[in-house]
Image: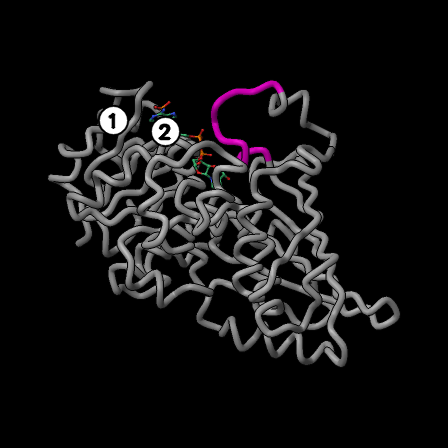
Amino acid sequence: MIRVGIAGATGYTGAELIKLVTGHPGAELTAVTSQSYRGRAVQDIFPSMRNVVDLTCEALDVDALSQKIDCVFLALPHKVSMNYAPGFLKNNVKVIDLSADFRFHDATAYESAYQEHVAKDLLEQAVYGLSELYRDEIAATNLVGNPGCYPTSLLLPLLPLVRQKLVQTHGIISDSKSGVSGAGRAPALASHFCEVNESFKPYKVGNHRHVPEMEEVLSLGAREPVTITFVPHLLPLTRGMLSTIYATVTENTTGSMIRKSLLDQYGPDTFVRVLPQGEFPDIRNVRGTNFCDIGFHLDKKSGRIILVSAIDNLLKGAAGQAIQNMNIMFGMAEGMGLKLIQGAL
Ligand SMILES: NC(=O)c1ccc[n+]([C@@H]2O[C@H](COP(=O)([O-])OP(=O)(O)OC[C@H]3O[C@@H](n4cnc5c(N)ncnc54)[C@H](OP(=O)(O)O)[C@@H]3O)[C@@H](O)[C@H]2O)c1
């Protein structure tokens, strides 16, 4: 049994991790941390966990926690995780960070979107936790930078095509929509019920912090610089994310070449489902699951491919993929504890 700790257990992704680890046959939840709920029982904070989770929130004391865990999930805000990851690694605790702090190889790219990095020396050993695309590297590392939810929804369909040069690397557009839990649990005016309900709007147009992350991964995959136009939107849903991505195909690329590329990358035993021709993803089919559904249409007239992907932002976009990475890092079956279809219709 792997002994697991969750730092930031009272946030949305932290709560998902509590549920996933509690139901995982190869892991045991031995510690949860919180600043504002320190000393409070998890079941008092989340009444749905009554009679199931018997733990109390403690302080984020790296040395004390390291005595009772083999693996820690840092479900903390950006700029916070990097202060704690080095201590856990020094104590031989494997780290899966859900923030952006270890998603970049290039510290300058991180710093352009966030702030000065205080653990730059770890960026070289950190592996980008897009499970299906970096499986071997994830298996060999002690530090995973779990991808952002928008990057997961864009990179899963696009990265295989970019790697194989089936699409051009300029002029890529992603029109992406997220449920409100993507913004985390801390209250903010923009995510109040009345601000979001029965409406739909773009936000952070031209300056979303996920853009440098996506461009770095795509550029490494293409072995040349890739820039994208990315427009996020807020959906009046609690959870779920859908991206519609437009790219121009390279000369002689056909629809069957695109399908083959995706199917070669994502076999039937992965969490990425390439839908039959003519079918497109629907958020309700992935909500409460760790799946990413992908559909596409090649518009021969314009030479553009339209890729559509859907994920649950809290699962494949965060906690589910983080558990998938834990499974890979500890040599367990990749899908252990993740065969969830309860939330889907
Ligand atoms: N929400 C998503 O869909 C999603 C998807 C992908 C990635 N992520 C990333 O995952 C991370 C967690 O996201 P979330 O949505 O779960 O956020 P959240 O709901 O705001 O939760 C953040 C957690 O961090 C704790 N925390 C806040 N400031 C802290 C500090 N200075 N020191 C220690 N603990 C602190 C909070 O706990 P207390 O106040 O109880 O201490 C809370 O438990 C973020 O980096 C986010 O960008 C989120």
Relative placement, left or right, of 132 versus 29 is right
Q: SS class of the residue under badge 1?
A: strand
Q: Please tell me which of labels 1 and 2 falls first in the chain.
A: 2
Q: Is residue 135 above or below residue 27?
A: below
Where on the image, by quarter, is ligand 1? top left
Residue at image location 42% in from the left, 64% down from the top: 134
Instruction: Classify residue 277 by image quadrant.
Output: bottom right
Residue farthest to the left, as pictured:
67
Give 55 or 48, whichever is nearer the viewer: 55
Give 205 or 36, whichever is nearer the viewer: 205
Q: Amino acid at mark 2?
A: Thr
Q: Which residue is mark 2?
A: 10
Relative placement, left or right, of 319 versus 285 is left
Q: Is mark 1 within 8 Å of ligand 1?
A: yes
Give the x, y percent position of residue 100. 45, 41
Tag 1–tag 2 contact (CB < 8 Å): yes
Any magenta on residue 185? Answer: yes
Q: Is mark 2 within 8 Å of ligand 1?
A: yes
Q: Which residue is mark 1?
A: 57
Any magenta on residue 100? Answer: no
Can residue 168 be seen in the rendering of this structure?
A: yes
Q: Amino acid at mark 1?
A: Cys
Circle 1 crowding by C-alpha within 10 Å: few under 14, some 14–19, many from 20: many
